[in-house]
Image: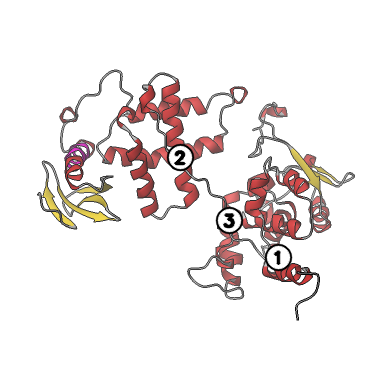
Amino acid sequence: MAKKRNSERILAKYFVWRVFRRNKIYWADGRSKKIDAGRHSLGTADHDEAVSRLHQLDAVRAVELKQADESILKSVDKDEITLERGVDLYKKYVARPAVLKGAKESTQSRYKAVFDKAVPYMKGMGLRTWNQIKKHHLESYAAFLQEEEYAYATLFLEVTTLKQLIKYLVTEKLLPRENEIDLPMEKAKDTNTYCYRAEEFAAMVELCRTTPDLDWLGDVLVALATTGMRISELASRRWGDIDFDANVISLKDESTNKRSGGGKARTTKSGYSRSFPIHAELRRVLEKLRLRGETGTVFRAVRGGVLHPDNVRTSLVKQVIEPLASRFPSDKDEIGFKDGRLHSFRHFFCSECANQGVPELLLMRWLGHRSSDMVQRYYRLHDQESQRQMKNLKFGGSDAT
């Protein structure tokens, strides 16, 4: 096996593996008709190290697939932290009470999704404890996610979460200081979320207004586009949040407050409450909805059902985006209207406010951001506005001829 080849067949103790290279990294494929040992990254570009890791992987998968007794694996020292125990400890830590700055349920769910992918990957590399994990393992995991075509933001979140877990274990003296990983990363400064144009927004609302059983969705789209709210925030708005006399909508973060009747506390992503004026177009929608009675949530699904964000997303794509896609075409590999989603309305709101001269500090307050960096990510100057601004510029004190 001294000879290095792009692909080779290796008969290990328990399985037959096809070892190959992709983007210079060695992978092992143990899938066969008889038994499926899976496909795994070996996390190294070195052939000899890859073969060594393959035999570790072979033993780990044999135990997991009940082809061998767990005793074949090296016993874990009592001072070492297994992958599963480390995850359990960290999950309990982030789920601590809000008064101790614990994470929200949505954040805890994101972390769980990270561990559900990362732990099997690490075990596939023959790793069993957090004591074993080094910088190159996280680099290998990031390369694996990129190979699987996960978004840049996902790579950043996943690797950052793993680094935070390790740092927590070090801080709690469950891991030695040398286990902390120094791996600088560049946070995304931009976003590829599509930002709707005014004519696209108008077409979507028109489609909803002229399609039976879609008027409710038209109300939701108008509200998202004229407030910049996230769908989770909009879905939880109650009539008590609407002050018609003051013409204001309030979003209260109830993390530290006990709700009357023991209901579930509503939260905002930033953890701060905010409020903003009601746009005239949205007020017309609210006045219409108020006619059915001011109890419960403001926005409802078809036939008055509960507004579930996931159902709204599905309805938008299937009943609005896809039918209108041919009207606003874009190349297959280009981000365009076909890629628009609910969060695109937040970008649309921000862009329209910025293009029409809303001061940045006021826009930050409406969106609930403490930093202008996030506003800059949402900000878009569409071609028409860019052309208008360019025509108004004068260089050298005179117009060019």
From the image, tell me which residue sits under label 2.
Answer: 184
Residue 49 in picture, x, y percent from top left: 20, 42
Q: Residues within 10 Å of mark 3 (few under 14, many from 20)?
A: some
Residue at 36% of width from left, 49% of height from top?
A: 143
**Tag nearer the camera, 2 or 1:** 2
From the image, tell me which residue sits under label 1.
Answer: 205
Judged from the image, the secondary structure of the residue bearing numbered disc 3 is helix
Instruction: Please say whether residue 57 is one of the residues in the magenta stretch.
Output: yes
Instruction: Quadrant for residue 384, please give it.
Output: bottom right
Q: In the drawing, what numbered circle is on residue 313? A: 3
Residue 297 in picture, x, y percent from top left: 72, 44
Q: Is residue 347 left or right of residue 239?
A: left
Instruction: Please say whether residue 305 is one of the residues in the magenta stretch.
Output: no
Residue type at the position of mark 1: Val
Residue at 14% of width from left, 55% of height from top?
A: 8
Q: Looking at the image, tell me whether mark 3 or mark 2 is earlier in sequence order.
A: 2
Q: Nearer the viewer, residue 48 or 32?
A: 48
Task: Note whether 222 is above or below 30 in the view shown.
Answer: below
Q: Residues within 10 Å of mark 1 (few under 14, many from 20)?
A: some
